[in-house]
Image (spheres, grey):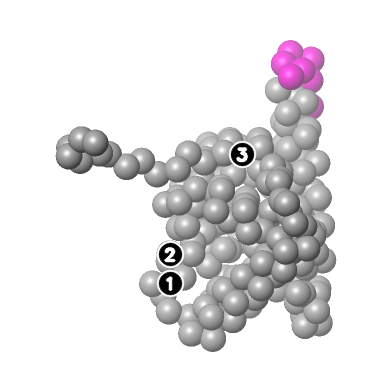
């Protein structure tokens, strides 16, 4: 073996288009048990003692370590569960961090097209550029650990609906000239809409002390 020091690279994150990837499991029951126990332990620890350094590490986890570690814990969890909610929030964060320019384009288009309070609930400035959206999604994730958990989920759901609206309308723009791109955006819009519904349901469950 060489004694020369080696460069260590941070893990490669998966493209945002693959953020519905699921990881194989030999024992689904054991995976479910671990997913729920780790999610509950994490939330209890950080919300009982909301140390800012710990919260900072949780918010920046995927930037430093990639998404795979989180996926192995929570990606197979039901949508309407605590680990399922955490998984979706980290995926949204990854999507924005990986391509903030596209996220900003879709968000601004969605904001202009939607006739709903979702842009206000999400809380982005107007207009919201790439840096503002990165700061927004990090703030929403931080709210899971330090603020009102249900409000953070509702903000994430609203954010997802704005993004979904933008993706739908931009897909329409490309339908005749770039059908493959239009199809990818339509798929993204559907996934974001589904996540928005899941996160809204999780917020309601949390308020009833029924999100496990």
Magenta segment includes 142 = no
Circles 1 and 2 in contact, beta carbons < 8 Å: yes
| Disc ID at residue 54 | 1
- In the rendered image of this protein, does residue 44 appear above or below residue 201? below
Figure quadrant of residue 211: bottom right
Whether residue 154 can be seen here: no
The residue located at (68%, 46%) in the rendering is: 23
Name the spot of residue 34 as percent of width and height, x first: 67, 67
Name the spot of residue 126 as percent of width and height, x first: 57, 51
Asked which secondary structure carries label 2, the reply is: helix
The residue located at (41%, 75%) in the rendering is: 52
Would you call the spot at circle 3 few (<14 residues within 10 Å), some (14-19), or many (20 or more)? some
Q: Which residue lies furthest to the top in this view?
A: 177
Figure quadrant of residue 73: bottom right
- Point out the stretch of residues depicted in magenta: 172-180
The residue located at (77%, 83%) in the rendering is: 209
What is the CA distance from the residue labelled 1 to the residue labelled 2?
5 Å
Whether residue 152 can be seen here: yes
Mark closest to the chain's N terminus, 3 or 2: 3
Q: Mark 2 points at which residue?
A: 57
Q: Mark 3 points at which residue?
A: 16
Name the spot of residue 120 as percent of width and height, x first: 67, 61
Mark closest to the chain's N terminus, 3 or 1: 3
- In the rendered image of this protein, does residue 159 appear above or below residue 18? below
Would you call the spot at circle 1 few (<14 residues within 10 Å), some (14-19), or many (20 or more)? few
Would you call the spot at circle 2 few (<14 residues within 10 Å), some (14-19), or many (20 or more)? few
Name the spot of residue 42 as percent of width and height, x first: 57, 74
Of residues 76 and 188, the one nearer the viewer is 76
Q: Residue furthest bottom?
A: 48
């Amino acid at each position: 073996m060489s004694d020369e020091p080696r460069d260590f690279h941070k893990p490669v994150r998966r493209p945002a288009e693959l953020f519905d990837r699921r990881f194989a499991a030999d024992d689904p029951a054991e995976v479910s048990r671990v997913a729920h126990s780790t999610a509950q332990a994490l939330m209890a620890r950080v919300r009982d003692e909301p140390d800012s350094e710990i919260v900072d590490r949780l918010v920046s986890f995927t930037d430093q370590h990639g998404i795979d570690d989180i996926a192995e814990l929570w990606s197979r969890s039901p949508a309407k569960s605590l680990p399922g909610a955490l998984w979706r929030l980290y995926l949204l964060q990854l999507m924005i961090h990986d391509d903030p320019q596209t996220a900003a384009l879709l968000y601004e288009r969605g904001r202009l097209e939607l006739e709903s309070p979702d842009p206000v609930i999400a809380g982005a400035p107007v207009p919201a550029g790439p840096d503002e959206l990165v700061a927004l999604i990090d703030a929403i994730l931080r709210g899971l650990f330090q603020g009102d958990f249900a409000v953070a989920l509702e903000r994430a759901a609203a954010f997802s609906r704005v993004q979904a609206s933008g993706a739908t309308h931009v897909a329409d723009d490309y339908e005749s000239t770039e059908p493959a791109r239009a199809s990818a955006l339509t798929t993204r819009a559907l996934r974001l809409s589904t996540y928005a519904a899941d996160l809204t349901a999780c917020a309601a469950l949390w308020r009833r002390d029924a999100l496990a």
